[in-house]
Image (cartoon, grey):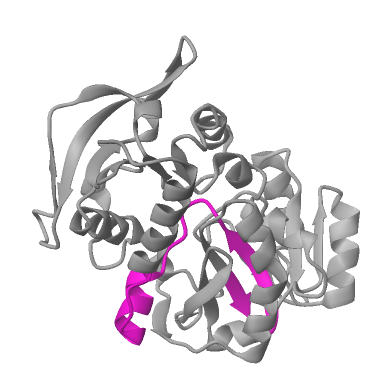
């Protein structure tokens, strides 16, 4: 029997149907006979101990310019649905965190993917610090002198905001770079949060590997190669996706973190590996499904839905 499924996401009109992972998750759900609903984060609200959303029925198709249809808005009690996908893009700010608190009221009776409490407790640049021997030398600090000392030790470093996303605010600081102090001043004025300093990993020139894990198991990978003259490999700043295979070190990293992901209900996760080092664990709105599907001839969204359906069936019977 089909499930009632809502996607909490940025508006469907904005997605790139050739790259967006949420789009193919919706396509797969529709192909399986599930009923789809769409709403954006501002449409979510809590009233009188009920989690509600102003949502619209949705249909999707792989046709540029006509990739979705939305019906008339309705006010839904999300506890009456079977699955809610938490898929809006970061920034991981207080608005994002608030949605996780609200969605906690319905999970797991309504299965929220990924588990909202675990999403809240696993910021991508902080969750990685809980595992030994898999991340490059890293400092998280607000004190400027500690950051200067870290730079003196490692010479060539990366500076980035603690809760940034998409490569925004990421700077490579080479030895002798006269902008270093100005960058520290900029970060301190922009936010009270600590910043991250990491030893630069030169293997990034060969690619920043995105590995998808499904229910804690590695399922596929791509390399994102930065453009010439660019330190960041994110595809929206010119990075190019190329076919990649999992190395023994990649599998070692996945084995180290996989059980923790599964235990926390983090079904769909993307990690970033540069050389032999894990730099981020993305649990909010990971991407990469379509690129891996095309390179490897697989259907990762189908594997994800197999897990979601099994997890739902283990919790309760589907609604009629």
**Residue 211 position in % (x across, y down):** 52, 74
* Range shown magenta: 272-300
Residue shown at 68%/40% (left/top)?
A: 191
**Residue 287 forms part of the magenta stretch:** yes
**Residue 168 forms part of the magenta stretch:** no
Decide which of 258, 182 is in the foreground and name it. 258
Residue shown at 75%/72% (left/top)?
A: 135
Instruction: Place residue 26 in its image quadrant.
Output: bottom left
Q: Is residue 182 left or right of residue 170?
A: right
Instruction: Tell me, yes or no, if residue 69 can be seen here.
Output: yes
Q: Is residue 39 left or right of residue 83?
A: left
Q: Is residue 83 left or right of residue 213?
A: left
Decide which of 124, 176 is in the foreground and name it. 124
Q: Is residue 3 above or below residue 24?
A: above
**Residue 21 position in % (x across, y down):** 35, 61
Q: Is residue 68 left or right of residue 82?
A: left
* In the image, farthest residue toward the top: 48
Q: Is residue 207 above or below residue 311?
A: below
Q: Quadrant of the C terminus?
A: top left
**Residue 167 position in % (x across, y down):** 53, 62
Instruction: Place residue 98 in its image quadrant.
Output: top right
**Residue 283 position in % (x across, y down):** 55, 55
Q: Is residue 61 above or below residue 109?
A: below
Residue shown at 71%/62% (left/top)?
A: 128
Decide which of 14, 120 is in the foreground and name it. 120
Residue shown at 53%/27% (left/top)?
A: 105
Instruction: Tell me, yes or no, if residue 160 can be seen here.
Output: no
């Amino acid at each position: 029997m089909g499930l009632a499924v809502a996607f909490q996401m940025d508006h469907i009109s904005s997605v790139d149907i050739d790259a967006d992972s949420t789009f193919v998750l919706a396509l797969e759900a529709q192909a399986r006979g599930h009923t789809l609903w769409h709403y954006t984060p501002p449409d979510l609200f809590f009233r009188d101990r009920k989690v509600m959303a102003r949502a619209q029925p949705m249909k999707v198709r792989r046709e540029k310019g006509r990739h979705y249809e939305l019906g008339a808005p309705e006010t839904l009690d999300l506890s009456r649905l079977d699955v809610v996908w938490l898929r809006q893009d970061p920034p991981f700010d207080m608005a994002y965190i608030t949605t996780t608190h609200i969605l906690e009221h319905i999970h797991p009776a309504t299965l929220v993917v990924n588990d909202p409490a675990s999403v809240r407790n696993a910021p991508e640049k902080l969750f990685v610090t809980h595992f030994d021997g898999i991340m490059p030398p890293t400092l998280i600090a607000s004190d400027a002198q500690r950051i200067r000392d870290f730079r003196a030790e490692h010479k060539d470093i990366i500076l980035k905001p603690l809760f940034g996303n998409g490569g925004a605010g990421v700077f490579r600081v080479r030895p002798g770079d006269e902008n270093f102090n100005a960058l520290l001043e900029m970060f301190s004025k922009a936010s009270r949060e600590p910043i991250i300093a990491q030893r630069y990993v030169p293997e990034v020139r060969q690619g920043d590997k995105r590995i998808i894990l499904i229910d804690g198991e590695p399922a596929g990978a791509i390399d994102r190669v930065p453009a010439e003259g660019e330190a960041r490999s994110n595809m929206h700043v010119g990075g190019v996706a190329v076919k990649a295979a999992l190395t023994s070190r990649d599998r070692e990293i996945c084995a180290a973190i996989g059980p923790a992901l599964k235990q926390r209900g983090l079904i769909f996760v993307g990690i970033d590996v540069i050389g032999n080092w894990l730099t981020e664990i993305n649990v909010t709105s990971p991407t990469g499904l379509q690129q891996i599907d095309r390179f490897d001839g697989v259907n990762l969204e189908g594997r994800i839905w197999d897990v979601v359906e099994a997890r739902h069936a283990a919790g309760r019977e589907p609604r009629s």
